[in-house]
Amino acid sequence: MRLFDSFEKLVDINAPAPAAPPPPDLAGFYRHFLGEHRTLFISLFLVGLGVALSDAMVPVFMGRLVTLVAVPDRLAAFSAEWPWLIGLLAIIVVLRPLLLLVESLLRNNALIPGVTTRIRYLCHRQLMRQSWQFFQNDHAGRLAAHVMDTPGALRESAESAIRAVWYILMYGTTTLLLLAQSSLYLAVPTVLWFIGYGVLLRYFVPRLRSLAGENAQAYSTLFGRVVDTYTNILTVKLFAREAHEDDYVQASLSEHQRTQRQHMGMVTRFMFALTVLNTALLAATAGLGLQLWLKGEIDAGALAMALPLTWQICSMASWVAWEITGIFENLARVREGMHSIAAPNLLQDAPQAAKLQVSRGEIRFSRVSFGYNDKHPVFEDFNLLIAPGERIGLVGRSGAGKSTLVSLLLRLFEVQQGQISIDGQDIDAVSQDSLRAAIGIVTQDTALLHRSVGENIRYGRPDASPEELQQAARRARADAFIGNLRDHEGRSGYEASIGERGVQLSGGQRQRICLARVILKNAPILILDEATSALDSEAEQAIQEQLGDLMAGKTVITIAHRLSTLVQMDRILVLDEGKIVEQGSHQELLQRRGLYADLWKYQGRDNIQGQHAPLFGKPPPPAPEPGN
């Protein structure tokens, strides 16, 4: 319907995102995400006012009708009253349904699908720009829950405050005015009810807010544990730890049940107290109204109007109580999500950051200091120059700093002192996107997305043609097995889905997909972190020549525990405790009989030469005999 379409188009979910990040305070957080939709909320506010006033006209119409039928001269009375009756009837029969329709369209066709989706996108976008360290310090499942739950909680709490709280305030005010117009005494029970309602809110709301916060936190922890278990289901199966995971989740379920039980117990007390208060209002209004009617101080019409008015207040009070409970549940969910969504981004681009321009590929580490904590620095005053087009191998024991060096070059972490530059450009002064676009990387941990083979390879260059995509797969020796792939939905080849983290592929197949991705990207700087560790010897031999072509003309950093893959590097750096303790070619390092020679000997010369070929090029030369 066109009417539905017009309301659905009121929110542009693809509008440009705000430049400023969401502030960490609750009021600022609400303004940040709801401010651009203020027109919708103001419209809902005004429509709610109209609905409240039109609802109040129902008892007024009934009161006038009772007064009319009680008059002896009915025809004269009807002649005098019919314009009022027709006007009230028009409000009730025509205006009220139209207002309710507009309210439903605003809520169901604009706010729920549009505003919620828009905020969800902005929350996801905000988290995506957080640092790698941020994601290391939290559960992926918990973060996903915040992105999915917080937007709805934001919208619902604001919407409830308008629809429920504003509604009862306006309806209650209208009721007081109408009752006071008939008799001031008749309004006294309603005034006392409002005072009692305020006392109940003052007592229960802080307790409900606190318990709702505990419940939201327990739910978030539970959600994170469940997702963590499913994400690592292979590890669970391999170690036969299903029962352990049952207990792990059960502990969170029990905690969530405890907090939920306490929260709902407080809600039950609140609702019972409100029921008692509502019953007292009805009894007091009926008794007082009857006495006033017996004394002749009010007519039957006033009494007929008063009782439905107070009954509607009681009915709405229970609804509003639930809404208020929901508001504080949603506030708790917003606060819980706000800690992640509004967390400061500690690794941002510099203002007006330029794009990195790589013309030669020179990399320089100048007096770099970095540590994951103050007590154990990884690098102190570290210096390294990698010439344009030079192929560097990194060797060292675990914890020597090899992966940290690469992470700093990719600016996944900020250096604490010193500078890293590429072709003379400080990487802190260029945009992170342009920096990482200039670097191709294949890691030992094959990171694949739960998408098709083609989409995973195209992650290196989304605008690649089908021919370029297939050529990259051929160079990575992946085209043969890709042609035989078929997923559960019947898609095959490059269109086949490979499952979460590529679970439907073998380790070697996953690594070849990653190699195809970096081949397609064709970046001027290349990082290979155990790039062929998941390949068998035959497969590794098959792609050596292609890797050699890929490295041609690029600046290359290769990390390898299998030293035979480094023998044809221009220079091999041996790291130990964050320092370069040796450097040189493979032969030079063997002649020095230092740490590299010890590592080479430890790996077993015969095993290395007999079973594992180098990453590209000729087989490694034999190690020098002792004394030579």
Image (cartoon, rainbow, N blue to C red):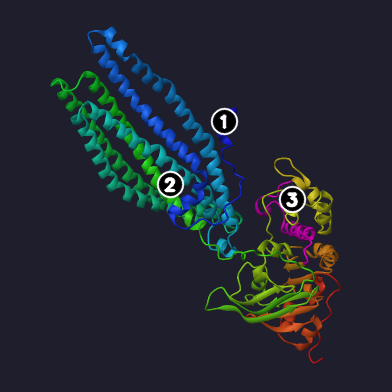
Please state the extent of the stretch shown in magenta in the rendering.
496-524
- Horizontal and vertical percent for residue 177? 27, 31
Residue 455 located left or right of residue 211: right
Mark earlier in primary sequence (1, 3): 1
> In the figure, residue 93 lies in which quadrant?
top left
Please check the rendered image and state whether residue 506 is part of the magenta-colored stretch, yes or no: yes
Q: What mark, if any, has residue 4 been given in the picture? A: 1
Toward the viewer: 103 or 156? 103
**Label 2 environment density (alpha carbons within 10 Å; few <14, some 14–19, many ≥20):** many
Q: Is residue 562 above or below residue 150?
A: below
The alpha-carbon separation of the residues under discs 1 and 3 comes to 39 Å
> In the figure, residue 84 lies in which quadrant?
top left
Q: Is residue 407 above or below residue 97?
A: below
Toward the viewer: 346 or 103? 103
Q: Is residue 181 above or below residue 602?
A: above
* Extreme-left residue of the structure: 295
Residue 609 located left or right of residue 135: right
User: Badges 3 and 2: C-beta atoms under 8 Å apart?
Assistant: no
Quarter of the picture containing the C terminus is bottom right
Could you say whether the residue bearing mark 3 is in a helix, strand or loop? helix
User: Badges 1 and 2: C-beta atoms under 8 Å apart?
Assistant: no
